[in-house]
Amino acid sequence: MSTLGISQKERLISRICFYAIVSLIMWGANLVIPDFASLEAQRWEDRGVARPYIAVPASEIEMILARESR
């Protein structure tokens, strides 16, 4: 069954192109737009404020402290 008078092959090519363009836009936006959470964390760290560890599992705290102690 064809849609809008195009063949199945043309529909497949159109979908592949569409998803490729969407993927490239998302990838490019990820490179251009900064990670606001890491920027905010860096600002607080520059001010000398300790990171809050509220409701963080103990195993994750151990990994964070081990990574930061290096």
Image (tube, helix red, strand yellow):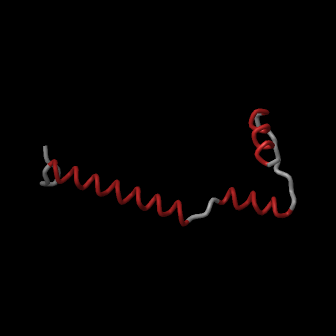
Residue 9: percent from left, percent from top: 16, 50
In this image, 15 relative to 61: left or right?
A: left
- The residue positioned 79% from the left and 37% from the top of the image is 62
Residue 69: percent from left, percent from top: 82, 47
In this image, 8 relative to 42: left or right?
A: left
Residue 58 occupies which quadrant of the picture?
top right
Q: Is residue 66 above or below residue 7?
A: above
- The residue positioned 22% from the left and 54% from the top of the image is 13
In this image, 59 relative to 14: left or right?
A: right
- The residue positioned 79% from the left and 49% from the top of the image is 70
Instruction: Pick out the residue farthest to the front.
Output: 70
Q: Is residue 64 above or below residue 17?
A: above
Q: Nearer the viewer, residue 69 or 42?
A: 69
- The residue positioned 81% from the left and 59% from the top of the image is 45
Q: Is residue 45 above or below residue 70?
A: below
| Quadrant of the frame with the N terminus | top left
Count all numbered tags in the image, as a single digit.
0
Residue 22: percent from left, percent from top: 39, 57
Instruction: Pick out the residue farthest to the bottom.
Output: 32
Residue 18 occupies which quadrant of the picture?
bottom left
Residue 28: percent from left, percent from top: 47, 63
